[in-house]
Image (cartoon, coloured by chain):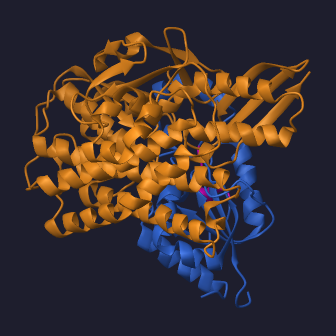
Chain colours: A orange, B blue
Amino acid sequence: MDGITKIEGNAGLSLHVEEGKVTDVKFKTLEYKRFFTEAMKGKAIVAIPQHLARICGTCSNAHLMCSIEACEDALGIEPTAQTKALRALTMHGLMIRDHALHLYLFSLPDIYGKDAFLDFDENVEAEHQLLHDGFDMKAAGNFLATLVAGRSVHAMYPTIGGFLKFPDAQGIAEAIKKLESVRPAALRLIDIFRNAPFHFDRKTQFMALVPNGNYGYLNGTIMTSRGEHYQKAEFRTHLEHVVLPYSQASAYVYGNEGYMVGALARLNLAKDKLHPKTRESLGELLTLFPSTDIFYNNLAQAVEILHSIDESMDILRTSKFVPEPVVKAPNREATGVGVVEAPRGTLYHKISVGADGLVKEGEVVVPTGQNQVNIERDIATLVQGLLPDTPKEKIELEIEKLIRAYDPCMSCAAHFLKVDWDSA
Amino acid sequence: MTDGEKLKIGWFSFSCCEDNTIVMTEIMNDHWADWKKKFDFRHARVLQSKNSMDEFDISFIEGAIASPEQEEKLKDIRSRSKKLVAVGACAVIGLPAGQRNAFTDAQKEAIEFLVARFGALPKVLKVADVVTVDAEVPGCPMDPANFLKVLGSVAAELGVK
């Protein structure tokens, strides 16, 4: 059985060092299993998207979009153009809010040598600016998600076949205003992460859902850095599940090797599809990609914030949203697959339903499980390079910074890493 | 508490999706300047690396209790807190994190080895099953306005405006 639990939360790390050599690294998700996929069984399909959104708080709206897609795939429902636009906006709101949380609250303190974002000094001009930028940026993403989807966490309006409520003109105008006002902050953020002093470069494979049209998070083809393409239904033929007896989570490999998913993988594979205004503002910065420097995942997230701002403003300015009924289809025995790019990478949902509309079984593959093998390998390389002269506290800080660059999950990113040292 | 003294805050997550943590960081978008003046976050993993387990005026607990270690940790937090507030559905009613409690026999059998492997409790508990709870903010996730209301009334009980 695949153990599916939320990945954000409590994580730990154990390191085994023998005669100055790192011999074993275990990155462990310590969060207790809540058995969401087991609990799907026997539930009505209509209840599944809201059920699976509860896997993860911070990317709940990505789970919601992914599950809705899987359910619609099973039922043979094709969403309307307006629904697709509203879903795209839901994802843009999520990316702005979630990336901003990671970059401002989790990563910036490392760069500024602070313990917490709230420790930034309002009397220092640059820090004052960042405090305001950070909370304004999060608020803009939150506002967009709330306007379109009802809430930025566990949204209520998106459902199988469409939306239950639609944004009004006043809200749209307010969203555009807020997005426009934080655009300069996004440019400042990009500048900071472009010049950040942390780097960790090594060869790796990457994988992402690459859209056919504009850079986005909901549609397209799964592509890899090797140039291979997969359709979503094939996902379990190319990803191999690895059981980690020491962790409450699962890991995945591709072609017997680790790979990475997330903002850096997306930008590496699809930078040419970014919004024209985003590309124009970035200029030669985009030549930094493709990159295998994991710390550029932060830069890639900052770039995605800018893209999501530009793309959202375009959609909001050019669309007219009118109430429309939810598309319905009769129950049937079928299996459906959904795949989206969640903030932390490719997310897969699979659902099998009976003719009675009740779920037979389901499967969820989350981004952090896919990054697990790479995280462990990178930590081993990093620690080996720091041994034997670096003090343990310093090594632990470096490990935390590396893990945070992967943005594996809320609490991991939030600095609580506990390292069990085992030196022989 | 005297005027000008900051409220010592603890924010703890147990078995859950941490949606209330996200909502709290969203509430902060509008209240961070005020909170920076009024709150001393003694323990909040989402905000900082340096956390202390000394004493708290108010501890916020999110999530259900899934293991004996979590049970002990919660009791420890309670013993250090003047007020303890359960936030979100998993803390307040134990669900959905404790959905395995209501599994069928077949489902329970399917997950039994995993419950055993990690030494989880046979039955997932809500916060009030383990310690005395002074106030609750229900919801999945909690409602921001209700959180601010409860925060205000608990702070008032401690003599802080």
Classify B154 as above or below A50. below
Picture residue at 70% right of the left edge, 28% below the top: A379
Q: Residue A363: where, in percent of width, then height?
A: 40, 25
Q: Is residue A219 located in the magenta-colored stretch of the structure?
A: no
Q: Residue A125 is drawn in which quadrant?
A: bottom right
Classify A264 as above or below A304. above
Q: Is residue A262 visible?
A: no
Task: Decide if residue A106 is on the left or right side of residue A236.
Answer: right
The residue nearer to you, when weighing A248 against A315, is A315
Task: Decide if residue B48 is on the left or right side of residue A7.
Answer: right
Which region of the structure is painted magenta? B124-130
Q: Residue A222: where, in percent of width, then height?
A: 33, 21
Picture residue at 24% right of the left edge, 36% below the top: A214
Q: Quadrant of the N terminus of chain B?
A: bottom right
Q: Is residue A99 visible?
A: yes
The residue nearer to you, when weighing B83 against B102, is B83
Classify A382 as above or below B33. above
The residue nearer to you, when weighing A99 against A48, is A99
Picture residue at 56% right of the left edge, 70% below the top: A128
Q: Residue A336: where, in percent of width, then height?
A: 26, 24
Classify B56 as above or below B75. below
The residue nearer to you, when weighing A213 against A94, is A213
Task: Decide if residue A276 is on the left or right side of residue B149.
Answer: left
Q: How many marks?
A: 0
**Residue placed farthest to the front in the image?**
A284
